[in-house]
Image (tube, rainbow, N blue to C red):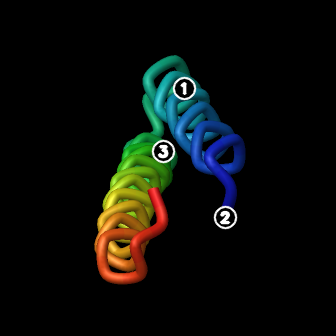
Amino acid sequence: MSELGNKAEQAKGKMKEAAGDITDDDSLRHEGKADHASGTAKEKVGDVKDKAEDAIDSVKDKLTGDR
């Protein structure tokens, strides 16, 4: 999922949480928290993946002499 998709999932979760608060619906509130947490986790995984790819590229460049 793209970074934008992760942000959208987080926003959707926040909206569900707010709707759950307004309607006093614990199920909707918990579902919103889960959606928000899922979007946050996916974003963190994407960040780690990007950093790992950058580190691998850096090592490749050093080994091949490219800079």
Q: Nearer the viewer, mark 3 or mark 1?
A: 3
Disc tally is 3
Specify the amino acid type for callout 3: Gly
Q: Which mark is residue 32?
A: 3
Label ID, residue 1: 2
Quadrant for residue 38, please give it.
bottom left
Residue 34 position, x and y percent, is: 40, 55
| Residue 30 in view, yes or no | no
**Which circle's residue, 2 or 1, is located before the other in the chain?**
2
Disc with the residue nearer the chain's start (2 vs 3): 2
Label 3 crowd (10 A; few <14 / some 14-19 / many >=20): many
Distance between mark 2 and mark 1 Cα atoms: 31 Å
| Foreground residue among 21 and 66 | 66
The residue shown at (59%, 48%) is 6
Query: Would you call the spot at circle 2 few (<14 residues within 10 Å), some (14-19), or many (20 or more)?
Result: few
Disc 2 secondary structure class: loop
**Marked residue nearer the N-terminal end (3 or 1):** 1
Q: Point out the frontmost of discs 2 and 3.
A: 2
Q: In the structure shown, which secondary structural element does the residue marked by tag 3 occupy?
A: helix
For marks 2 and 3, give the CA distance: 18 Å
Question: Residue at (60%, 38%) from the top-left corner?
Answer: 7
> Which residue appears farthest toward the front when viewing the image?
65
Where's residue 23, x and y in %? 54, 26
Which mark is on residue 33? none
Mark 1 lies on residue = 23
Q: How far apart are labels 3 and 1 at the CA level?
A: 13 Å
Q: Nearer the viewer, residue 62 or 12?
A: 62
Give above or below for 19 relative to 65: above
Q: Name which residue type carries label 2.
A: Met
Which residue does the image show at 47% across and 39% down from the upper left?
Answer: 25
Q: Could you tell me which residue is drawn at 66 percent across and 64 percent down?
A: 1
Q: Is residue 12 above or below residue 45?
A: above
